[in-house]
């Protein structure tokens, strides 16, 4: 059975997910395998942060093991990083040291929706850098 | 012995095979070197933003794109849609529920007459078709008083569910659902 869909939650019932972009098949695997291909097998740290803004995100990006920061709501961010369990306490310490106020936090597994977002973003970044390369060559 | 038999029958058949699929409409190259295969019983989700080629790939598999527009090795239930003479057999083995119901329903006819029209093209006998239709209508929660009135009087959700019933009526080997969650109630 094939399901063509915009509804990323539909991945929950799929044995395999095909992700397409501009007529190219980017991924074809089980949703579980795709999520596990993320840093630290897709573990995310979700924080609700008081007065979250771009500046705070930039500060967090400065924490080396952080691989990806996604905004999941007005004051909610999800953070993917290497060696999750080892680095989580360090990240919390880093936030405290930088006077970033954590209102709540949880450890979770990334959803297929997040994987999709990250994968498409990666492709967009690739396209932008290849365009820039062309401009430089010209 | 018995166990062995079961394991043999459980061996999965390859239902869809796609190798190096490229689709071009004139200068527009809309699908690039797509490869995948699907075994019996698997549910595949096709994800992508608008214009990613999701529907185009399914249209190749469902014999809706002329061969001159695509290249590659494609097999649906073991048959290639590249050959026109395979189309009737492939179409009788697959179910297709389009994004918009107006593409697969006759709005001036009743659900039951729609069923008759479609099942006659699959060579199903009238009585069997009616029986299966009633079963599916009940599963999909289509109110009995709508079965014999023109489809145009049905609600959006009812039309979508009728469209699904028609996609399932011939017990297809492969089912294609294009945006099934829109309008579903």
Image (cartoon, coloured by chain):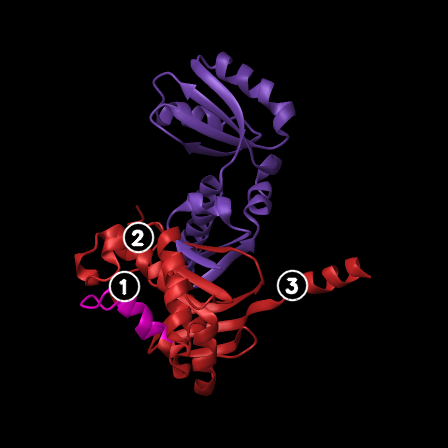
Chain colours: A purple, B red
Does dot 1 land on a helix, a strand or a loop?
helix
- The residue tagged 2 is B142
Tell which circle, 2 or 3, labels the residue nearer the N-terminal end: 3
Residues B92 and A11: in front is: B92
**What's the mark number on residue B12?**
3
Q: Give the Cα separation between the discs numbered 3 and 1.
A: 35 Å
CA distance separating discs 2 and 3? 34 Å
Which structural element holds mark 2? loop
**Figure disc tally:** 3
Q: Position of residue A40 (x, y in %)?
A: 61, 35
Displayed quadrant of residue B123: bottom left
**Mark nearer the viewer, 2 or 3:** 2
Question: Which quadrant would the C terminus of chain A be assigned to in this image?
Answer: bottom left
Residue B77 visible in the current orientation: yes
**Residue that carries the numbered disc 1 in the rendered image:** B111
Q: Earlier in the sequence, mark 2 or mark 1?
A: 1
Answer yes or no: do the residues labelled 2 and 1 have beta carbons within 8 Å? yes
């Amino acid at each position: 059975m094939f399901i063509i869909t915009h509804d990323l939650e539909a991945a929950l019932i799929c044995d395999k997910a095909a992700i397409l972009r501009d007529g190219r098949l980017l991924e074809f695997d089980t949703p579980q395998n795709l999520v596990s291909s993320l840093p630290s097998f897709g573990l995310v740290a979700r924080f609700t942060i008081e007065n979250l803004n771009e500046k705070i995100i930039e500060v967090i990006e400065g924490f080396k093991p952080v691989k990806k920061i996604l905004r999941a709501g007005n004051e909610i961010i999800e953070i993917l990083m290497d060696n999750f369990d080892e680095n989580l306490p360090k990240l919390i310490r880093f936030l405290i040291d930088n006077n970033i106020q954590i209102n709540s936090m949880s450890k979770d597994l990334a959803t297929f929706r997040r994987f999709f977002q990250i994968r498409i973003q990666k492709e967009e970044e690739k396209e932008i850098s290849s365009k820039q390369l062309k401009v430089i060559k010209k | 012995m018995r166990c062995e038999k079961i394991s043999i029958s459980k061996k999965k058949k390859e239902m869809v095979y796609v190798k190096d699929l490229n689709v071009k409409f004139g200068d527009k190259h809309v699908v690039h070197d797509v490869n995948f295969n699907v075994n019996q019983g698997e549910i595949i989700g096709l994800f992508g933003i608008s214009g990613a080629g999701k529907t185009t790939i399914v249209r190749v598999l469902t014999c809706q794109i002329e061969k001159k527009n695509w290249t590659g090795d494609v097999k649906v239930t073991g048959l290639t849609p590249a050959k026109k003479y395979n189309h009737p057999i492939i179409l009788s083995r697959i179910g297709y529920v389009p994004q918009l119901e107006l593409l697969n329903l006759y709005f001036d006819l009743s659900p039951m007459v729609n069923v008759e029209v479609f099942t006659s093209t699959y060579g199903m006998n009238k009585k069997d078709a009616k029986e299966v239709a009633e079963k599916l209508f009940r599963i999909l929660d289509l109110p009995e008083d709508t079965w014999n009135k023109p489809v145009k009087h049905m609600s959006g959700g009812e039309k979508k569910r009728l469209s699904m019933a028609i996609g399932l009526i011939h017990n297809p080997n492969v089912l294609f659902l294009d945006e099934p969650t829109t309008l579903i109630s």
